Amino acid sequence: MVTSSARWWRHRSTGLIIFAVLLFALAGGSVADIGMDAKIQHVVTAYLAPETVGKPGGLAVAVYAAGHTDFFNYGVADEATGQPITSDTLFNVASVRKPFEAILVALGTLRGELRLDDPVSRYVPELRGDYIKSVTIGELATHTSGLLLPTDHPPWPNDSFTLPQFFEALNAWTPQSGEQPGKQRIYTHAGYVLLQLALERRYGRPIGELIEARILKPLGMNQTFLPERGPDHRAMMAPELMKNVVQGYAETGMPIGPRGDQQTYYDFPGTGQMFTSARDLATFLAAFIDGEAIDPQLRQALQMTRREAFHVTEKFGQAMAWENIHLDDVTVVDKPGGLNNASAYVGLVPAHKTGIVLLANRGEFPHEIARYHVLPELARE
């Protein structure tokens, strides 16, 4: 919980807080010398608060360190109404959904229900193409399948796939020269849509039900939803929930879509986005970092997904959905996500039991600040 004094600080200007920290340093202290709560306050204020000044929408931040979470909220959920961002405001988290499917895969392997080297065609028999039929579950989870459809990269197409069209595209897929399953890292949204289908076929349940039963409920995440997309392209959510969903904005400030806007190139169930809050993702983060009170097998699955599976460069590796960034003094494990009207980021430094959640209702929020500055600073002794 954040103290009343922390809430007081949060509503003061960035300059005043930084000035106070500088005075402390001049008095003979340093950021490393002050308590963890004050250190978190300083780092969030110095690096993240300025990114909300004069910008559309707002930002919800959760920082987990020393066994507890601090929350910071800036700006508004809707410019038109002035509704403020809170730690319970619901955001579209885009590709931050991918770690949840990766956890389902990890749980399945631990329980002997599937194997990482299972060909996806074992569960999705519609896959008959020479290349795609040999791609495995593990390769999809680690972005090493080689798959890359037009929906995976700009310039973004206008067309969308029905399920039969998706299978047709997959069966016709031919990689670039030299690419082979498991031999390179190519980030692919289509691969995770295919992974979703494989999981649904294996368990005979919709992906939303699987994530809720196997991850959300065990972790106590009751503010996370995977709604279907309605005819108006909005999330199909109860009115009382929709009131708590942000309006999304472009970096320029233009509203994009209505509240609950769902953007996808796939016209079949389960392919929409996940909506959640900073509070729920803080629970998720704490389970990754500590997880002492959760089911041991689920804790093992969480840890399994963040372990590097494919070495890309000296400083970058790919895990199951998560990315590993090897900096000079720390290794950051993280997952960014974003649309043109939403940005999300979850990052942690396992060795220091520190992590952060960023949720913004605008496109192109610079999450790299957390990766390269906030997390290393918080982890530094």
Image (cartoon, rainbow, N blue to C red):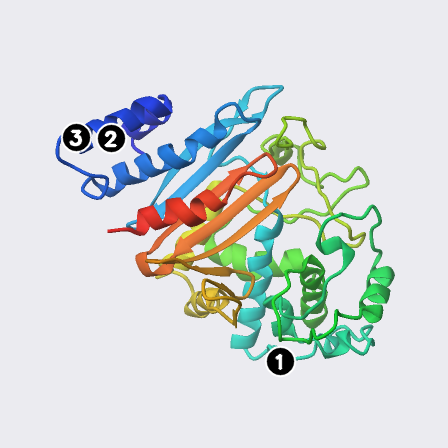
Would you say 358 lies left or right of 31 here?
Answer: right
Give x and y (percent) for residue 2: 33, 35
User: Label 1 sits on what residue type?
Assistant: Asp
Tell me the SS state at disc 3: helix
223 in relation to 330, above or below: above
Q: Measure the alpha-carbon separation of dots 2 and 3.
A: 9 Å
Q: Which residue is drawn at 49% across and 58% down?
A: 218
Q: Is residue 5 visible?
A: yes
Q: Position of residue 158 (x, y in %)?
A: 83, 46
Which disc, if any, is residue 208? Answer: none
Please, which residue is most extreme toward the left here? 28
Residue kind at label 3, given as amino acid type: Leu
Mark sitting earlier along the chain (2/1): 2
Total marks drawn?
3
In the image as oriented, which residue stretches furthest toward the top? 81
The residue lying toward the viewer, choosing from 32 and 227, is 32
Q: Which amino acid does label 2 sit on?
A: Val
Which residue is the site of mark 1? 117
Query: Eyeballing the image, is 181 above or below 97?
Result: below
Measure the C-alpha gap from mark 1 to mark 3.
58 Å
Q: Is residue 204 visible?
A: no
Q: Name the residue under label 3.
A: 26
Q: Which mark is residue 21?
A: 2
* x and y percentages locating residue 181 in the rendered image: 67, 75
- Name the residue at 80% across, 73% down: 127
Compare marks 2 and 3 and give the one earlier in the sequence.
Answer: 2
Task: Tell me where residue 331 sits by quadrant.
Answer: bottom left
